[in-house]
């Protein structure tokens, strides 16, 4: 089962792996044509009712595979308004090759009683008006067309989903198409099987790697849509660079405000690295249990995303404070560095993304391995037992929520340098503002890797984490050379 949103992400990942969407459209169209051959004999009358998105594009392809049939392709609206290049190219191909195509610009011609397009005489109607790109009830002219399709006696075959069906939530618009058969692509969509229609899933040649490996599609899924939210870094004491890097990375990844709660002995130093941060000192040399309740209250009052761990050190009182914090905190948090050792032993209602490196993973009770990627199944089992998302950092990163597991291959050898993990924690925290934890972890790992790759072009092994900060926006929102 895959949602329409995730499908678009996998599709973008496939394109980055060298399988462009036009190729997938060709497979989709072919699958639709095969389904028509199963329900109607050569010579049968087939009317394709197509919209101006890629759902329509799939059906334009199908028409080319149906030369043995009597096919008419109706486009709802004008060809100039076809929304994507690949759908337009497939439409143009039909026109140039002299297929029977018609633009329907007057929706009243589609009305069930006008019968201008002889829908009643069709053996098969292909519903290719709307696929996963729909929002809300059908608008005109699709609404009138759907009513006419529903009123006709023909066998109705829907492309991907019946028009009006929400592939993310499984809702069906009140005025949507009722299909007899659905040919959906790659994987079934939420609640599709509950419809009173025969659903088949067509393999359209999307490589498994497009789901398994983080890619640009994962970034589009998690990319912040507005400058919003607050990250609250609880870090610093023995070290000062780590919390400053994490907090700055969160700003670079789109949050509105980045706070650092730190001992007053180091607060000035942390502030000194960056005027963009809001440093909130507490009266102590290092985090201790006295501060835990206040920190929970502050984070929860403002719905902050917490980053717990960077630069905190391993003093007993600090670990006890992180334990207390996690026992009462109920919001989202990225847990990194020294705070990680506490996670397996606390009961918490918080939503955590744990970001251990290889050594920290082993210390938490996860697999002790040189190749995280080869140990992906064990890391998945470990995350399931832990009950939190794990982002294990290595040459290849492994992200898992205990059920779903992704691998990130982005990055460069120069990123072994200190500080890149702090950036990652800050980026993931920023993405947690809108994305679910596994999506945020996956996209965060990829963005961090791409930020490093962008610099490595010039700096090879000399890359610094502080320099990578500047590359985060381009890695997340797409730079000139992306
Ligand atoms: N994502 C993928 O991996 C693949 C997708 N393919 C096809 O692409 C489809 C998605 O294509 P698109 O994203 O272009 O979207 P659609 O073809 O579903 O429709 C988008 C169009 O519908 C309009 N629209 C949205 N809501 C509407 C409403 N309520 N009433 C009337 N019009 C409305 C939009 O303005 C837009 O022009 C899939 O369903 C599938 O058929 C295939 O080509 C193969 C691969
Ligand atoms: K459809």
Image (spheres, rainbow, N blue to C red):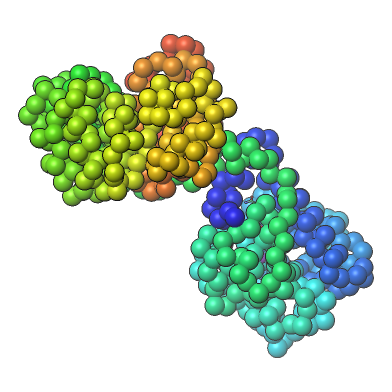
Q: Is residue 94 left or right of residue 208?
A: right
> Could you say where residue 285 lies in the image, as x and y percent from the top left?
11, 23
Q: Is residue 45 left or right of residue 140?
A: right
Residue located 60% across and 59% down the image: 189
How many tags in the picture?
Answer: 0
> Could you say where residue 240 lies in the image, as x and y percent from the top left?
22, 21
Q: Is residue 12 left or right of residue 283?
A: right
Q: Is residue 356 visible?
A: no
Establish if 87 lies above or below 414.
below
| Quarter of image, res 167 | bottom right
Residue located 22% across and 34% down the image: 322
Quadrant of the snapshot with the N terminus: bottom right
Depth order, front residue of 433/271:
433
Residue located 63% across and 79% down the image: 144
Ligand 2 is found in the corner quadrant, namely bottom right
Q: Is residue 44 left or right of residue 205?
A: right
Depth order, front residue of 151/60:
151
> Could you say where residue 139 lies in the image, as x and y percent from the top left?
55, 72
Residue located 73% across and 55% down the image: 202
Depth order, front residue of 158/288:
288
**Residue furthest bottom in the image:** 113
Q: Is residue 149 visible?
A: yes
Establish if 188 lies above or below 357.
below
Depth order, front residue of 145/391:
391
């Amino acid at each position: 089962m895959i949602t329409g949103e995730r499908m678009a992400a996998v599709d973008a990942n496939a394109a980055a792996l060298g399988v462009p969407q036009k190729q997938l459209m060709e497979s989709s169209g072919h699958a639709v044509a095969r389904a028509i051959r199963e329900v109607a004999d050569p010579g049968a009358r087939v009317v394709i009712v197509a919209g101006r998105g890629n759902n329509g594009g799939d059906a334009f392809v199908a028409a080319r595979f149906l030369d043995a049939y009597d096919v008419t392709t109706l486009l709802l609206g004008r060809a100039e308004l076809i929304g994507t290049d690949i759908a337009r190219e497939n439409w143009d191909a039909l026109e140039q090759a002299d297929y029977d195509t018609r633009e329907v610009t007057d929706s009243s011609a589609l009305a069930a009683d006008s019968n201008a397009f002889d829908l009643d005489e069709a053996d098969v109607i292909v519903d290719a008006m709307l696929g996963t790109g729909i929002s809300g009830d059908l608008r005109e002219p699709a609404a009138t067309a759907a009513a006419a399709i529903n009123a006709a006696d023909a066998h109705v075959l829907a492309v991907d989903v019946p028009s009006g069906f929400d592939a993310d939530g499984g809702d069906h618009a009140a005025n949507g198409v009722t299909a007899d058969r659905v040919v959906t692509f790659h994987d079934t969509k939420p609640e599709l099987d509950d419809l009173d229609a025969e659903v088949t899933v067509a393999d359209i040649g999307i490589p498994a790697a497009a789901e398994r490996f983080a890619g640009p599609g994962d970034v589009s899924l998690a990319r912040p849509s507005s400058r919003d939210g607050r990250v609250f870094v609880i870090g610093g004491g023995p070290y000062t660079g780590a919390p400053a890097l994490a907090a700055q990375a969160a700003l670079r990844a789109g949050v509105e405000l980045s706070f650092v709660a730190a001992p007053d002995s180091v607060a000035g130093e942390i502030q000194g690295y960056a005027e963009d941060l809001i440093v909130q000192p507490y009266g102590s040399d290092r985090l201790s249990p006295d501060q835990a309740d206040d920190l929970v209250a502050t984070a929860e009052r403002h719905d902050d995303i917490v980053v717990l761990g960077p630069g905190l050190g391993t003093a007993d009182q600090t670990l006890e404070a992180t334990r207390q914090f996690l026992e009462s905190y109920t919001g989202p948090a990225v847990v990194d560095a020294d705070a990680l050792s506490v996670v397996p032993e606390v009961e918490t209602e918080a939503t955590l993304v744990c970001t251990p490196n290889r050594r920290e993973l082993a210390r938490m009770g996860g697999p002790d391995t040189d190749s995280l990627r080869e140990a992906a199944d064990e890391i998945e089992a470990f995350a399931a037992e832990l009950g939190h998302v794990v982002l294990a950092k290595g040459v290849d990163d492994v992200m898992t929520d205990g059920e779903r597991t992704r691998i990130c291959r982005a990055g460069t050898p120069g990123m072994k340098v200190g500080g890149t993990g702090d950036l990652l924690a800050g980026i993931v925290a920023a993405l947690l503002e809108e994305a679910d934890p596994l999506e945020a972890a996956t996209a965060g790992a990829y963005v961090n890797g791409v930020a490093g790759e962008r610099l490595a072009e010039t700096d090879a092994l000399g890359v610094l984490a502080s320099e990578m900060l500047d590359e985060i926006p381009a890695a997340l929102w797409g730079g000139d050379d992306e």
